[in-house]
């Protein structure tokens, strides 16, 4: 690269999905070295900035185990995370899409559709658009007539097209055999009910008592042990936050999968997995 040619205008290199290399100390150290080099006069002359994108755990946390963590911290400014769309914004996107495609739906159906899309996509704009595209194709195959059953079809298509790996990771953590209570499944189901980024085992305990009251024993439910298992293995669903007794979900796509894969049978107070043909 010719330094003189590029020094007159700012260049931005986007490093997306930083969490994908978090487990590799070699790659994280290499990235830390590159960040530090930005202050080198030979490279600063190029007027290049890095935009590092990661899940909202605090990007600097990713560099905590690198050899140059303090030097990296001095060169990174963390900006506020991009907020998700709220339910009204998702409804407006759904409405505009249906209007453009000239698909007639009742107001009650519009409310049901937009609520479902907002719930399973977590309001993340990219996922909202992906889901709506999958639903539009299902409606097209149904002669442009909307039926509520098409939401299940769209769930399946959206999950298998973009979330297959996450689906398999969540499935690997479910109870391997049928049990009376299937507490692990209850815990995973409740992960998608948490409304905060960081949570404790007591938060899951409270949700289980609310969602599955008749299955709560007089003794300890062993939630701490289950959360520990979910944070270990080849495809952990959650991560423990240092020495604190709090956890975070490793990827919001896991929550999307859980919302689609699992549902509660209110009559039996059991978590049931939907059967998707793969």
Image: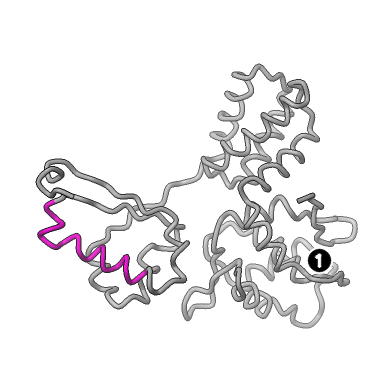
Q: Residue shown at 15%/44% (left/top)?
A: 6
Q: Quadrant of residue 61?
A: bottom left
Assess disc 1: are there few (<14), some (14-19) or many (≥20) residues with their C-alpha within 10 Å of its C-alpha. few
How many badges with numbers are in the image? 1
Q: Residue shown at 74%/37% (left/top)?
A: 151
Q: Residue furthest front?
A: 1
**Residue 199 coordinates in the image, percent (x, y):** 56, 67
Above or below — where is 205 with respect to 191? below
**Residue toward you, 147 or 209:** 147
User: Which secondary structure dominates the residues rendered in magenta?
Assistant: helix
What residue is pinned by disc 1? 213
Above or below — where is 18 with respect to 148? below
Q: Residue shown at 72%/62% (left/top)?
A: 171
**Residue 190 coordinates in the image, percent (x, y):** 69, 62
Q: How is the image coloured?
A: one colour
The answer to whether residue 36 is magenta is: yes
The answer to whether residue 201 is magenta is: no
**Residue toward you, 245 or 162:** 162
100 sits left or right of 215 in the view: left
92 sits left or right of 276 in the view: left
**Residue 272 coordinates in the image, percent (x, y):** 82, 58
Above or below — where is 101 with respect to 9? above
Q: Residue shown at 75%/66% (left/top)?
A: 185
Residue interval drawn in magenta: 28-45
**Residue 169 coordinates in the image, percent (x, y):** 65, 63
- Label 1 SS: helix
**Residue toward you, 221 or 129:** 129
Q: Quadrant of residue 192?
A: bottom right
């Amino acid at each position: 690269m010719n330094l003189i040619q590029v020094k007159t205008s700012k260049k931005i290199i986007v490093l997306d999905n930083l969490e994908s290399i978090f487990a590799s100390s070699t790659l994280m150290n290499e990235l830390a070295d590159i960040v530090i080099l930005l202050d080198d006069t030979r490279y600063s002359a190029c007027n290049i900035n890095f935009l590092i994108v990661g899940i909202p755990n605090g990007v600097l946390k990713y560099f905590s185990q690198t050899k140059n963590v303090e030097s990296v911290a001095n060169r990174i400014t963390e900006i506020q995370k991009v907020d998700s769309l709220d339910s009204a914004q998702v409804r407006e996107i759904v409405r505009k899409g249906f209007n453009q495609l000239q698909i007639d739906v009742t107001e009650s159906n519009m409310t049901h559709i937009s609520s479902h899309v907002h719930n399973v996509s977590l309001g993340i704009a990219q996922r909202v658009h992906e889901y709506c595209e999958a639903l539009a194709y299902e409606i097209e195959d149904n002669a442009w007539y909307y039926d509520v059953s098409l939401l299940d079809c769209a769930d399946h298509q959206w999950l298998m097209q973009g979330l297959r790996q996450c689906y398999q990771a969540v499935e690997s953590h479910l109870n391997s055999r049928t049990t009376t209570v299937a507490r692990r499944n209850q815990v995973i189901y409740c992960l998608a009910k948490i409304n905060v980024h960081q949570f404790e085992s007591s938060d899951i305990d409270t949700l289980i008592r609310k969602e599955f009251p008749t299955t709560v024993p007089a003794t300890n439910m062993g939630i701490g042990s289950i959360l520990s298992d979910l944070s270990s293995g080849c495809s952990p669903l959650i991560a423990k936050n240092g020495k604190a007794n709090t956890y975070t979900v490793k990827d919001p796509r896991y929550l999307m999968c859980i919302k689609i894969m699992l549902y509660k049978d209110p009559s039996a107070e059991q978590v049931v997995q939907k059967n998707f043909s793969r």
